[in-house]
Amino acid sequence: MKVLILNRRDIKNPQGGGAEVYTHEVAKSLKQSYENVTVFSSRFKGSPQEETIDGIRYIRAGNEVTVHIHGFLYALKHRKEFDLIIDEFNGVGFFCFLLPRSVILIHQLYREFWFRGLGIFGVIPYVVEPLLLRCYRRMPAVTVSDSTKEDLKRLGFKDIHIVMNALCNRPIESVAEKEPQPTLVFLGRFKATKRPEDAIKIFKLVKAKIPEARLWMIGKGPDEAKLKKLAEGTEDITFHGWLTEERKFELLRRAHILVVPSVREGFGINVIEAASQGTPAVGYNIHGLRDSIRDGLTGLLANSPEDAAEIIIRLLKDPALYNQMASQCLEYSRDFNWQKRAEEFRQVIKKIRNQ
């Protein structure tokens, strides 16, 4: 028995993120039930056309746009060889609603992303995305959050299953000592959809009330030069670039609060990564973050930079509340392990196939 997973990127793609980790982990789990699991994705600089990673066969063709056509044609040609096809929808899918034994896997709708990334030209994909998704509505769907489940229900999906994200690291045993100065941290790509500029705006408002505060910016991306210009004239903002996993978790552990000003998230794995180090998150009240941040327990939700700054100041000035929230973060994060999540995914697929 064989499985085909179609995804825009793969685990080795330099532009990959949480969705690609998710795909690889569930592929490894499916390997327990299926003799062959193949992932079809786009090529990137220096990538081989085919390789095996952790027992998973990876095939690559096309770029991040044309891969959808290459993937569909591959699935069409080999449809009789596969017992299950998983079409991973990232703004655009692989049109497998035309093929039997197919399931859609979707982390989030892009909606606001289109305008943030494309400006006025985003109106075209903004309109097209839900129309494409409606073509999939009779298929079983797997998603990562209640927020996306509600989006799918509004589009007419009936058979929806939630399998959340998980951590690749182990949570620490107890809350570690934090930095002597109140320290905020942003973790993510420096691009419009993550709104890293808002992290700097929020920090400036916090620093006006807490002069010793600091901000660590962890990440890289197309907006880096613009962000560094925005940070000019404000002390205590450090750009760390991309870090090793060890260094990343060290900084998350030492920081006081993760700032998450994204436009929209599928779930927000950086929130769980910070929680695993005893660090609460303050993020916008948006799709995905409503699921990953347990408001009032492991972090707090805000509606604007000003609101976020006020929340952060209040939290930093209330040690009892902060320490309670940091401890709750650790307990919350322990549920997010890949062994559990991958098994949940495998059981969902088994249920779908037995329907």
Image: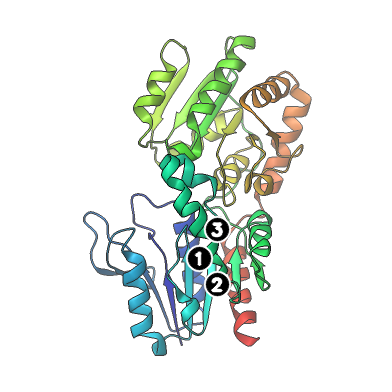
Instruction: Please tell me whether mark 2 sits on a helix, a strand or a loop.
Output: loop
Compared to residue 243, the image places residue 147 above or below, namely: below
Amino acid of disc 3: His
Tag 1 residue: 132
Front residue of this view, candidates 219 and 318: 219
Q: Which residue is mark 3?
A: 107
Horizontal placement of 233 versus 310: left or right? left
Q: Residue at x 58, y 17 (%)?
A: 180
As drawn, the label of residue 343 is: none
Q: Are marks 3 and 2 in contact (CB under 8 Å)?
A: no
Nearer the N terminus, badge 3 or badge 2?
Answer: 3
Residue 223 higher or lower than 164, as above or below: above
- Along the line of sight, the residue nearer the viewer: 205 or 213: 205
Residue highlighted by disc 2: 136
Q: Label 2 crowding class (10 Å Cα cut-off): few <14, some 14-19, many 20+?
A: many
Check contact, mark 2 vs mark 1: CB within 8 A.
yes
